[in-house]
Amino acid sequence: MRAVFAVLALLVSTLTATVAAAQEAWIQVEARPTRAEAEDRARAYARTLPDVTGYEMAAGWHAIVLGPYQIEEAARQLNLLRREGLIPGDSFLTDGRVLRTRFWPPADTAAADGAAAEAVAEPAQATVAPEPAEAAAEPVAAAPEPVPQRIVDPFPPAEGYTEARNSEALLTREEREELQRALAWFGYYTAGIDGAFGPGTRAGMSEWQSRNGFDPNGILGARQRAILLAAWRDDLAAMGLRLVRDDRAGIEIELPTAMVEFDHYEAPFAHFREKDGSGVRVYLISQQGDATTLFGLYEIMQTLEIVPLDGPRERRASSFTIEGRNATLASYTQAELSGGLIKGFTLVWDPRKAARIDKVLDAMKASFRPFGDVALDDALAAPDSAARADMLAGLEVRRPERVRSGVFVDGAGRVLTAYESVEGCDRLTVDQGTEAALTASDAGAGLALLTPVTALAPADYATFRAETPRSGAEIALAGFAYADLLDTPVMTFGRFAGPGGFDGAPGLLRLDLEALEGDTGGAIFDTSGAVLGLLLPRSAGGARPAPEGAALARDAGAITAFLLANGVDPRTEVAAGAMAAEDLGRRATGMATRVACWN
């Protein structure tokens, strides 16, 4: 009788193990053609994920998998890891039938793990319970074996080639287009969505199969179609891409509604704030205007904090695009002019948080459609919004580190300014925002020379006068005294106090002049319109700043020597007759320019 029970126990044990094995599943995250590539990828995954294993496959490729898990747990982990962006969006479940010899973790690690497990198991194997005497034994009902819970594989069974062809033939046009969209989403298909499975679609299917450990025959069976579509729909669900129609803005566009939500209108923008810490924001652009308005918007967008400085920009006759990116922020803006209306959008994201944002951007570009003859009213604004100098329509304006003055020194638009204007700057702009490069500088003389990256044509440029004027002679300063609060230079009048610094240092001019910080780097003119010198910061010329109502300038002789040494042939002239005040102001402001330092 004991022999019969032993046989029954063995059968039950074998059956239970078989059922348990049938419930196991792996998450296949990648497949690589060579073992070396696969080991590199497995090592990378193992840094952040548990249960990483690598197996050679029947087709000769090498699979990187997670698991094994029970099927329900495997499906849960698959969805979770895909949503978090920790594994590729086209990862899928496999029953392991194609997995052969394990190559990861390495053999020495696996051997060590096995030895540890054997050492732990050894005491249990050494303990054998003595058989009870037959006379004392009473039949005891054995505890029933638990019935394994039935877990359903979420995908259809695999099909052979002929079955796959037959099932594919039954697909509707809509189902075929859906497969093309899924292939395009993951980058396997780039042609039009037409439902026709031509060479492009077949090549995409074959590539997807290769990447996922299937026979790359270019025919997706029911199981493979289900795996592909499930991964695509999971991505769409995680992003919440939905077609949004804004009747006030007159714009229809697909937005990632799981990542953003409507906040408020503040013309010309409809603001969509980030949702659940997604790091994503959207701004719909809608305003009336013409080409001048469009070009103005192009310039304004680049002053906003949401548009990083680095990235391509393109302005055309009736549209523009702006891209910007740094380590913590990226954005894309497009706008177009049609029928007196400017419509567009800006997508902003944190590259550290937002995975697959390129797919969101592609969907927004493809779906963007202006409609009607409406635009956001300028009166629309958030009820609690406050007018701030550093805000524009609810968006923070990028401000320069400092703004100083400069003077054009030749017809090519090269600019002379004070060394303090450019010291420690990551980026420099002159005029109305033209990028400029630091060509030369002399910290001792307090001078710097800038060359615009794109050509400038100044209204006028400096003519220098080397003779020292008489003490008490009238002088004028053209500078951006109020930094970036005014777009035009301001004329400040004073008198020449004498040559030399306050301590008698040569190459300097003393001035009786009420100058502000933004005037630093501005040109000092005599009444004939010639440049006598360049205003230095109040701290120049010694440890103590210049007294109130007084200033220092580098004289024309030192300036012309600096320019000649750095490839500029300056204009010079002897003293001429005095100009009318309005003519002097027109000439001086025509050659003055703003110099902005950005960090």
Image (cartoon, grey):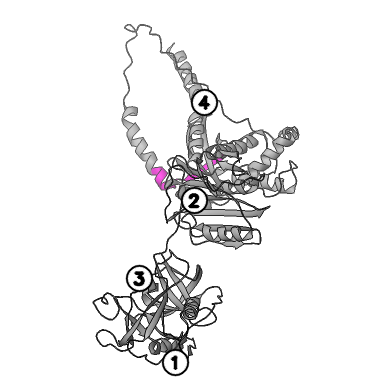
Residue under circle 2? Answer: 393
Q: Which residues are magenta?
A: 98-111
Residue under circle 1? Answer: 575
The tag earlier along the polypeptide, 4 or 1, is 4
Residue under circle 3? Answer: 517
**Number of the label disc, if any, that sits on residue 495:** none
Task: Compare residues 28 and 177 and report the one nearer the observer.
Answer: 177
Residue under circle 4? Answer: 18
Q: Amino acid at mark 3?
A: Glu
For label 3, count other residues whose C-alpha is less than 10 Å away and answer few (under 14), some (14-19) or many (20+). some
The answer to whether residue 187 is above or below residue 242 is below
The tag earlier along the polypeptide, 3 or 1, is 3
Residue drawn at x 51%, y 22% as measured from the top left: 15
Q: Amino acid at mark 1?
A: Ala
Of the 4 image quadrants, the one containing the C terminus is bottom left
The answer for how far apart the CA atoms under marks 1 and 2 are is 51 Å
Q: Amino acid at mark 2?
A: Ala
Residue drawn at x 49%, y 61% as measured from the top left: 309
The answer for how far apart the CA atoms under marks 3 and 1 are is 29 Å
Q: Can you give x and y, in whole percent of width and height, for residue 318 in the image?
A: 66, 58
The answer for how far apart the CA atoms under marks 3 and 4 are is 83 Å
Question: Nearer the viewer's eye, disc 4 or disc 1?
Answer: 1
